[in-house]
Image: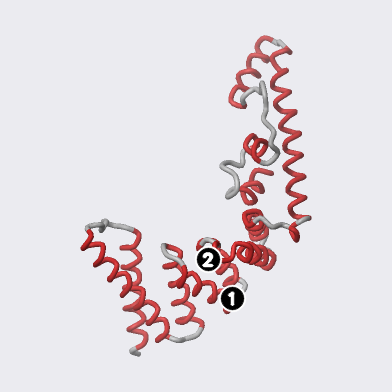
């Protein structure tokens, strides 16, 4: 099914990966006088009832164009895979990376994500850096993973920063057996959160049951567990 492959390749590039959307955005082709897909069943039932062959003209023309477009999409898939070494569009590189990851080819997927991050450099979004870090983690490339988590922690804000801090804390606790370092990472996050929360209260911008509140509760649990572990 080319739809699933297209989703992995272009879901972040185009507003939709339906065949008609790919025709317009990928191939700059716009159908004219095309029978909408939703009307095809009605046309078929009319044909079956009245035996009017002319009722099928638009249906056959629609499906013929579908076949031509699907062949173009398939050819584009092959071209992207064959020419991946020369790709310079980060979203296409990440799309191919998702495709290889779905095939359990983590090494190739990682290399493609690295190239995308290199192209974007400081403009690379935190979610893409985090995605790359998780692939390094799966490949047990711990130095590369921790470097990216630290980069996210220092240069970014939001949920991926919190997720990166959690991964760093888990790394130091379980891989390095450095409970003190894990404690410091978690404590620093909590101190920062509480300071920001005080500022939000002063400014009257606090919200109830926000994702940050949930993160704070989870971090508190992690901190207490680490304290118990360090006192043994």
Residue 195 percent coordinates (x, y): 28, 71
Q: Which mark is residue 134?
A: none
- Quadrant (top left/top right/bottom left/bottom right) for the C terminus: bottom left
Question: 19 or 46: nearer the eye?
Answer: 19
Picture layout, residue 73 above or below residue 51: below
Quarter of the image holding residue 106?
A: bottom right
Residue located at (45% from left, 86% from top):
178
Q: Which quadrant holds residue 185?
A: bottom left
Circle 1 sits in a helix, a strand or a loop, which is it?
helix
Residue lying at 72% horizontally and 57% vertically, measured from the top left: 87
Viewport quadrant of the N terminus: top right
- Residue sitting at 64 percent across and 34 percent down? 20
**Viewer-proximal residue, 152 or 35?**
152
Q: Earlier in the sequence, mark 2 or mark 1?
A: 2
Query: Quadrant location of residue 17?
Result: top right
Residue tagged by mark 2?
130
Residue 144 is marked as: 1
């Amino acid at each position: 099914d080319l739809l699933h492959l297209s989703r992995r390749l272009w879901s972040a590039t185009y507003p939709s990966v339906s065949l008609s959307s790919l025709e317009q955005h990928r191939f700059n082709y716009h159908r004219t006088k095309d029978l909408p897909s939703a009307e095809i069943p009605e046309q078929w039932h009319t044909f079956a009832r009245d035996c009017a062959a002319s009722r099928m003209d638009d249906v056959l023309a629609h499906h013929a164009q579908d076949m031509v477009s699907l062949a173009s999409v398939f050819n584009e898939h092959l071209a992207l895979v064959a020419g991946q070494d020369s790709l310079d569009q980060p979203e296409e590189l990440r799309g191919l990376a998702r495709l290889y990851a779905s095939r359990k080819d983590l090494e190739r997927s990682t290399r493609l994500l690295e190239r995308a991050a290199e192209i974007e450099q400081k403009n690379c979004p935190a979610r893409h850096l985090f995605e790359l870090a998780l692939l390094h983690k799966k490949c047990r490339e711990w130095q590369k993973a921790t470097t990216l988590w630290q980069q996210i922690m220092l240069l970014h804000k939001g949920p991926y920063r919190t997720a990166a801090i959690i991964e760093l804390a888990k790394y130091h606790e379980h891989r390095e057996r450095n409970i003190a370092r894990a404690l410091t990472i978690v404590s620093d996050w909590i101190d920062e959160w509480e300071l920001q929360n005080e500022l939000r209260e002063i400014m009257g911008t606090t919200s109830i049951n926000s994702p940050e509140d949930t993160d704070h509760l989870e971090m508190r649990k992690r901190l207490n567990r680490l304290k118990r572990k360090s006192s043994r």
